[in-house]
């Protein structure tokens, strides 16, 4: 059975159409661009942005320096195709690497690394790091404050001595009062015993003729 050239051409075009439509379906999502870009040299970076060919979820982004120190702050935010990762602050000069991992729209994980360099970042001003005169004022006042704190402690023995001296007359008054009470009681008992003698004698004298 022979096929006509027209039938063969039709079959060939159909195969091309099938391959063209199946290609995008078989292709996975991928990283489209990044800020900073791969291998770029920038002056200042305070956040990292990754854009993918389709919407992604469950993003993980880590920004490390040359010493392995992590500079990301908080969790990354996924907004459709764009993932944004905040940093702890503007990065100083040095080499860095962005390591990312996301789950694509078809459920396959996507991961990779993006190296970049920071050069020409503004250095902190000396005035910001130098201590102000007002911050040094408490240091000069510290000895005076310590002297005032020690003054009540040094006067404590004097107060105790004064308390001891004022307590002595109290004890003396108690002792004297006790002696006076004993003396008064003794005198009262003696006065009660004296009148009994003369009365008995007068009665015996009256009975005599």
Image (cartoon, helix red, strand yellow):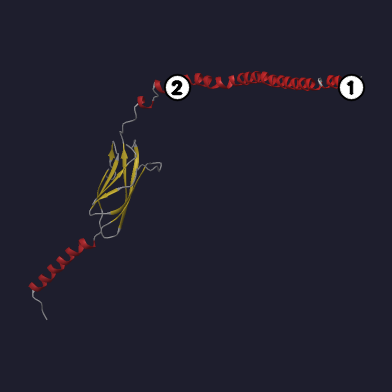
Q: Position of residue 133 (x, y in %)?
A: 40, 20
**Which residue is labeled 1 in the image?**
207
Residue nearest the viewer, comparing 35 with 56: 56
* Residue 37 sits in quarter: top left
For the point 31% across and 40% down, which residue is it?
117
* Residue 208 sits in quarter: top right
**Which residue is labeled 2 in the image?**
138
Numbered badge on residue 77: none
Q: What element carries label 1?
A: helix
Q: Position of residue 104 (x, y in %)?
A: 27, 57
Residue nearest the viewer, comparing 197 with 150: 197
- The relative height of residue 188 versus residue 39 in the rendered view (above or below) is above
Relative to residue 165, is residue 54 drawn left or right?
Answer: left
For the point 20% across and 62% down, which residue is it?
23
Quadrant in which the C terminus is drawn: top right
Residue at the right extreme of this rendering: 209
Q: What element carries label 2?
A: helix
């Amino acid at each position: 059975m022979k096929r006509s050239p027209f039938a063969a051409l039709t079959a060939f075009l159909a195969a091309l159409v099938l391959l063209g439509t199946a290609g995008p379906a078989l292709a996975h999502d991928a990283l489209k661009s990044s800020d900073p870009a791969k291998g770029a040299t920038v002056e200042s970076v305070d956040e990292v942005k990754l854009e993918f060919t389709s919407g992604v979820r469950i993003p993980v982004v880590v920004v490390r320096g040359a010493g392995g120190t992590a500079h990301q702050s908080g969790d990354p935010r996924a907004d459709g195709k764009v993932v944004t990762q905040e940093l702890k602050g503007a990065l100083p000069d040095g080499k860095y690497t962005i390591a990312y991992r996301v789950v694509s729209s078809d459920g396959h994980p996507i991961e990779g690394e993006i190296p970049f360099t920071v050069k020409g970042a503004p250095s902190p001003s000396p005035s910001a790091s130098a201590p102000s005169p007002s911050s040094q004022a408490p240091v000069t006042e510290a000895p005076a404050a310590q002297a005032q704190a020690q003054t009540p402690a040094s006067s404590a023995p004097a107060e105790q001595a004064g308390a001891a001296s004022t307590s002595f007359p109290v004890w003396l008054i108690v002792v004297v009062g006790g002696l006076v009470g004993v003396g008064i009681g003794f005198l009262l008992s003696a006065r009660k015993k004296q009148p009994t003698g003369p009365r008995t004698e007068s009665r015996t004298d009256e009975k005599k003729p």
